[in-house]
Amino acid sequence: MDRLQAPQAARLLMPGLLALCVALLPACAHRNATAPEVASPAASTGSPYAGFAVAQNKDGGAIVLDVIAGPAALAGLLPGDRIDMAGGEKVGAARLLEMIRVSSPGMRLPLRVMRDGRVLELNLVVGDREQWAAPATYPSRIPYAEPPRRTSPVWLDQVEAKVASAAPDLAPVRERLQKMLRDLAREDRGFNNLRLNRQALADPGTLIEWEHRLVSEMQPAADARNRIVPLLCEILVLDCSAIHGVPADTSATPSLAEFAASIAAANRRVREAFAGAQPRDRLFGDLCYLLEETATKRTLIYQPEALRGIRAMQASMHVDFAALLNAFDRLIAVASRVPDASTSAHRKIPAALAAMVEGEILDYAEVDGGYVVIGGPGPNRYRMDKLYAVIDTGGDDYYLWGEGVPLETQIVIDFAGNDRYEARVGGPGAGWLGASVLIDMAGDDTYVSALGGCGAGAFGFGLLFDAAGADTYRCDAWSVGAGIYGAGVLIDAGDGWDTYGNTEQVSGCVVIVRDANGRVSL
């Protein structure tokens, strides 16, 4: 659920994984000082925070060791800067730490900084630590469990043996590295730490073992959709006991009204999942910012709106992901029982719906201020911003997503034709702040998304299932099965020659990319 807890990204993005020396204790002024314990969320309210580590140089001055996302970065401080004066007073490391420790969030502290022989005047505005603390600051919601010792060898073991034989002098270094990874796995901080991630740190070979199991469980492709939710429950360590109540009857064909009612029920479940989080429109904006910044600049450091990214991370601690996964499971069940389009009656189409669909509409139903649409066999063009579900009977169709706040849930089922799915943010089979299922049964299709699309999940769960054809995936950052605070699943079950271009495999939770030959990329 939390891709941003990988060690390198954590250093760049998450204040809680570094020694927040200036924000907390004078003892941190020394390079070899032990990192302080991180306070609980309740205890950290109003604690002064600066966001840089400082040491004392040989002349007794304060030298900046590291800068992380926070007020110091916004003030312009860089590693290597020597802070000569603070608040008009000549300071060393200990005095500087004390001045910040006794300050209040919002206080302005003028700094005189020496950098490369130049004198700079910077203004540090002390922040509130709770405001800047990302999920990695807080205790893990999942206690650490020692992974079982593997009994089955994998190819990685052979590589390790060859390296050990070829370079015996490196044995002490390898052992130190392995110990560091094992210790990192046991680290009980990081609210969204996943058991699978910890297990991979303690023994990388277990990830290969898990991949083999995943491939076998996802075959045949026809059954893969039914196995997704139990698999995600296991990976995310969620209590999925309530999910088992989703009806699995595929014998009866629902009416359009029943189909729409099932979607409305899934929408309610999504709203329940986000009841404790910030307003949906603000969270969507913060999430877009976080993904765009990390996709382009790789860091929130020195970004003037870095707090928006931190705020998006913090929201992950207030979302009921079991309820969200429940909605996703409901959506998969709904998508497996579609209304019979042949019995649909032509009715007068409302002007609002006509503005969203170009081409023949066989029938429709209203849901939560949007629509469920059954499209005709000819070519149709769909604007997806207010369409909770599209069932298209054929034709070369075009699906277009805008950049507004996404719907709670969305289903697309296209039975035939060479179709094109296009979005800038989210889009084809992407669960943003909710759940999404896209099933394309035939044709040579094209999927396009600039951010977080093509079977991706961002604070949600997304599934893209393509059953046949030679398909093209042109999907950029956080796409093609990527997940951040959620999960993305892409299953291409056809035997056509598929093309994956302009893709960046950035994964948050679990990435499943399965082609016709059973290969899986993680």
Image: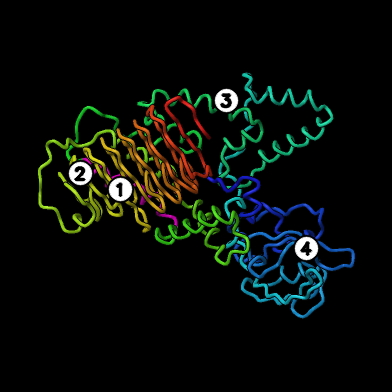
Give the spatial CA distance, label 4 vs label 3. 44 Å
Q: Residue at x 63, y 28 (%)?
A: 205
The residue that disc 4 covers is 80
Query: Left or right: 291 with respect to 352?
Result: right
Q: Amino acid at mark 4?
A: Gly
The residue that disc 3 covers is 209
For the residue carrying disc 4, how many other residues have a C-alpha within 10 Å: few (<14), some (14-19), or many (20+)?
some
Give the spatial CA distance, label 4 vs label 2. 63 Å
Q: Check the image and tell me how it is coloured.
A: rainbow
Residue 498 image offset from top left, x and y in percent:
42, 34
Q: Is residue 265 magenta?
A: yes
Q: Is residue 213 magenta?
A: no
The residue that disc 2 covers is 375
| Residue 291 marker | none
The mark nearer the N terminus, 4 or 2, is 4
Of residues 161 and 517, the one nearer the viewer is 517
Q: Is residue 271 visible?
A: yes
Q: Secondary structure at mark 3?
A: helix
Give the spatial CA distance, label 2 vs label 3. 44 Å
| Residue 399 marker | 1
Give the residues in magenta. Answer: 259-277
